[in-house]
Amino acid sequence: MLRKTRIAVIGAGLGGMTVAAFLQREGFEACIYEQAPAFSRIGAGIILSPNVAKVLRRLGLEDMLVAAGIKADCYISRAWDTGETLYRIDFDAATEAKYGGAYLNVHRGDLHAILDRGVKPGTIAFNHKLAAIEETGSALRLVFENGVKVEADIVIGADGLNSKVRESLFGAEPLRFFKAAALRTIFPASALNGFAIPDCTKWWAPDRHLLPYFLTSRRDEVYIIGVIPWERWDSDLSFLPSSRAFLQEAFAGFHDDLQKVIQAPTDVTLWPIFDRPRNDTWVKGRIALLGDACHPVPPYMGAGGAMAIEDGAILSRCLATYDSAEEAFAVYQHVRLDRVGHVQRISWENSWMRGPTDTDWFYQYDPCTAPLTPPEGPAS
């Protein structure tokens, strides 16, 4: 495809930043439009598995991520009441060599700041909330709520669960509430009062789970996400304030080791979990979707960000390889559907590493070298 092709990426999330960074390295004119006023260190933790670490290495960002986050030495699944180890994987040098990348915990805000280093300065336009996409015949016109209008040859919708780009393709579709909510908190490790915890441990009960993990190599910051049943979400807000008392109530009866952890945080928030039914159409004309805009998943496998980053790597390769957007988009969708669908199924089941698990198919995958197989035909 001609490198003078103008590509507009809507959304500066993980997938949007990844696809833009790769496209810019390929010589494309790729600009990112983000509705937020700026990046900030708010939000939550995120786990970057080896399949993602390989992508970030290709962008030259892996060392910065290792410095900002933590190479977890293990992942442990434990029974909620007895503390029995249900599954364990150690991330030592041999495991890292086997999978070709590290297993990293990092603050999402720190990850965003590092991804910002991966794109050209001045190519992110903040305060640009998309209002509409118009066909002009020769181009696509993007209309933003701030009154700005921009023309592009290709549009990539990386604008999340409530994607305006998706709505422009398929119309407004209601979200599906997963009948669950997530309690989230970040707190200084000093609040543990010397109680030692592993780098990453998930506690499993029949209807809920809780995962505390360190966010920095100094092990001075801890993130907790605990998912509980929640019958309905009536608020228009994206999250609600909660409390340590409610966190303790929600996980009352869990093992004493966990009780020593959940007494530490002070600021707790409650987030609804929404997704959408599977949709196997992610592309139309000169517009493509990636990440939560086309395949949202509940946070049970911790793979939503990974799938968006993988999408970005594959989509950029397709655009750099094929002569037309239509051909590139067809290959991108074909290559991604089965893998993403498998991740969606596991996430919906909430079964990932609950017991003995084959992690090879997930961690060994490298979207920077995976075959770009057309819907029918040999790999490229």
Image (tube, rainbow, N blue to C red):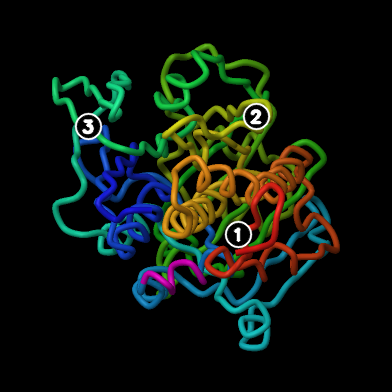
Which sits earlier in the primary sequence, circle 1 or circle 2?
Answer: 2
* Residue extending farthest bottom: 94
Classify 10 Å Cα crowding around label 3: few (below 14), some (14-19), many (20 and above).
Answer: some
Query: What label sits on residue 151 in the rendered view?
Result: 3
What is the span of residues highlighted in magenta in the rendered image?
54-59
Give the label, 1 or 2, closer to the camera: 1
- Determine whether the residue tagged by mark 1 lies in a helix, strand or loop: loop
Residue 158 rendering spot, x and y as whole percentages: 42, 39
- Distance between the alpha carbons at the discs numbered 3 and 1: 29 Å
Quarter of image, res 300: top right
Q: Residue placed at 15% from the left, 22% from the top?
A: 146
Residue nearest the observer in this picture, 1 or 196: 1
Query: What label sits on residue 279 in the rendered view?
Result: 2
Quarter of the image for the C terminus: give it.
Answer: bottom right
Q: Residue placed at 41% from the left, 27% from the top?
A: 165
The residue pinned by badge 1 equals 372
Q: Residue placed at 82% from the left, 40% from the top?
A: 206
Q: Is residue 128 visible?
A: yes
- Is residue 57 highlighted in magenta? yes
Residue type indicated by callout 1: Leu
Left or right of 30, for residue 341: right
Query: What label sits on residue 103 in the rendered view?
Result: none
Which sits earlier in the primary sequence, circle 3 or circle 2?
Answer: 3
Q: Main secondary structure of the magenta part?
A: helix
Residue 257 rendering spot, x and y as whole percentages: 67, 59
- Distance between the alpha carbons at the discs numbered 1 and 2: 21 Å
- Is residue 352 highlighted in magenta? no
Which sits earlier in the primary sequence, circle 3 or circle 1?
Answer: 3
